[in-house]
Structures are given as structure tokens and as C-alpha cells.
């Protein structure tokens, strides 16, 4: 089933390497704006096939202490933001992939 606590960035790197990947890293800028506030509970709900798993992999790769993704994110849209590395790889992340329950 995989690593749940502080996962590495393998799933994100696999997603990023596909032809269909679209850089949505500025989503992390929005998430960073609510870290340590009363609004820091976020729910990503989108219709089927809208990239929830890819977004989850990206978010996990950004925040997880289990990997160093500075070089990867510095080359993305988020890397152009002044404080892109403020929370980069600073949190313990628990990643649950509910898609695995159905396989």
C-alpha cells in the first residue's frame, strides 16, 4: 500500500513527467496563506477526473519532510513567488490514497 508518514516525492515526480501534466503549483501559494490560521483545514473537492490525486501528490511532495523538493518546485510557477520555500518540506505529512481501497 505504500508509505503513509512523510512520503517521498515519487508519485509527484511520476505525475510531473507525463505529457498531460499542467503546472498548478500556485495552489500551494493559496494553501500557504492559510497555514497556522483558523482556516487551515482545507478540503479539495472536484468532480471525477479533475486531478485531485495529482494535486494531492503535489501537496504531499511540497510539505513532506520525507523528501527534498526545492529544486523541483523552484522550476515551477510557485518558484517565482517570493516566499515559495517558506513551508517547503517542513511538515510531517500523512498521506492516504483512498483509490488503493478499490483496487
Image (spheres, rainbow, N blue to C red):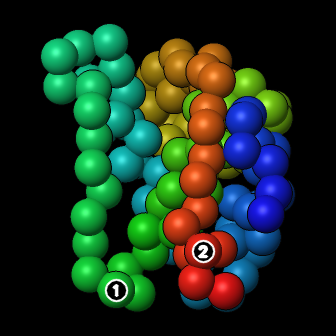
Label located before the other in sequence (1 or 2): 1
Q: Quadrant of residue 67?
A: top right
Residue that protrudes farthest toward the left in the picture: 38
Residue 85 drawn at (x, y percent): 58, 23
Q: Which quadrant: the C terminus?
A: bottom right
Real-space Cα distance between discs 1 and 2? 17 Å
* Callout 1: SS: loop
The residue located at (52%, 16%) in the rendering is 86
Depicted 16 relative to depicted 59: above or below:
below
The residue located at (54%, 67%) in the rendering is 98
Q: Quadrant of residue 19?
A: bottom right
Residue 41 drawn at (x, y percent): 27, 32
Nearer to us in this view, 101 or 72 = 101
Answer few, some or many: residues within 10 Å of disc 2's Cα (few below 14, many 20 plus, some between 14 and 19).
few
Check residue 48 in the rendering and tell me which mark sits there, or answer none.
1
Residue that protrudes farthest toward the front in the picture: 101
* Callout 2: SS: helix
* 3 on left or right of 80: right
Q: Quadrant of residue 52?
A: bottom left
Answer few, some or many: residues within 10 Å of disc 1's Cα (few below 14, many 20 plus, some between 14 and 19).
few
Please identify, in this view, whether the residue under mark 1 or under mark 2 is nearer the observer.
Answer: 2
The residue located at (17%, 16%) in the rendering is 38
The residue located at (61%, 47%) in the rendering is 95
Residue 56 drawn at (x, y percent): 51, 56
* 76 on left or right of 29: right
Nearer to us in this view, 50 or 2 = 2
* 32 on left or right of 74: left
Q: Is residue 31 visible?
A: yes
Q: Which quadrant: the N terminus?
A: bottom right
Q: Are marks 1 and 2 in contact (CB under 8 Å)?
A: no
Disc 2: which residue? 101
Depicted 33 relative to depicted 7: above or below:
above
Amino acid at each position: 500500500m505504500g508509505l503513509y508518514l512523510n512520503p517521498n516525492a515519487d508519485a509527484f515526480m511520476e505525475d510531473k513527467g507525463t505529457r498531460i501534466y499542467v503546472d498548478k503549483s500556485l495552489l500551494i501559494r493559496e494553501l500557504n496563506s492559510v497555514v497556522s490560521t483558523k482556516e487551515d483545514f482545507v478540503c479539495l473537492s472536484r468532480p471525477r477526473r479533475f486531478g485531485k490525486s495529482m494535486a494531492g501528490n503535489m501537496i504531499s511532495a511540497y510539505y513532506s519532510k520525507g523528501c527534498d523538493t526545492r529544486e523541483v518546485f523552484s522550476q515551477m510557477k510557485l518558484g517565482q513567488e517570493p516566499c515559495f520555500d517558506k513551508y517547503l518540506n517542513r511538515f510531517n505529512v500523512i498521506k492516504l490514497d483512498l483509490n488503493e481501497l478499490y483496487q
